[in-house]
Image: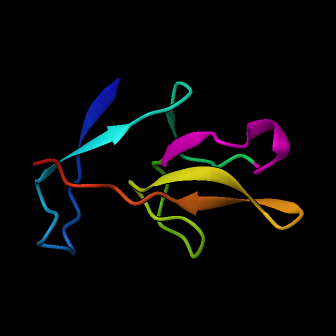
Amino acid sequence: MPYQVILKDPNDPKTKGKVYQVEIVGGGIQTAEMPEPSEDNEGMILQYTGETTADFTHGYFYEVKKSGSSYVWEAIAVQASE
């Protein structure tokens, strides 16, 4: 079931206040601390609610994906609804 997410990025006037459709797979949740990516949580999707860092941006959605022989958090592209 898709959820409506309102993105409010004061630094990007193209997305400020617009509504986007996001499909949350596997019971997605929000978190201020990202868990270590691993085989056990491959495919997990989380929205990061902590402070923006070099690794994660506040409000962005991330999915655990396999990268070579390890696992990484990869930002998910969010499509605008029509």
* Picture coordinates of residue 25, whole percent (x, y): 50, 32
Q: Residue at x 53, y 53 (%)?
A: 62
| Residue 46 falls inside the magenta stretch | yes
* Picture coordinates of residue 33, whole percent (x, y): 62, 48
Q: Residue at x 33, y 55 (%)?
A: 78
Q: Residue 69 lies in what quarter of the image?
A: bottom right
Q: Which residues are magenta?
A: 36-47
Q: Residue at x 57, y 76 (%)?
A: 54
The count of marks equals 0
Q: Residue at x 11, y 72 (%)?
A: 13
Judging depth in this view, the residue of 64 and 60 nearest the camera is 64
Judging depth in this view, the residue of 37 and 50 nearest the camera is 37
Residue 10 falls left or right of residue 34: left
* Picture coordinates of residue 46, whole percent (x, y): 53, 42
Spot the residue most to the right.
69
Residue 71 falls left or right of residue 62: right
Residue 26 falls left or right of residue 30: right
Please, which colouring scheme is shown?
Answer: rainbow
Above or below, 66 against 25 in this view is below
| Residue 50 falls inside the magenta stretch | no
Residue 13 falls left or right of residue 41: left
Quadrant containing the N terminus is top left
Judging depth in this view, the residue of 81 and 53 nearest the camera is 81
Q: Residue 39 lies in what quarter of the image?
A: top right
* Picture coordinates of residue 21, whole percent (x, y): 25, 42
Q: Residue 4 lies in what quarter of the image?
A: top left
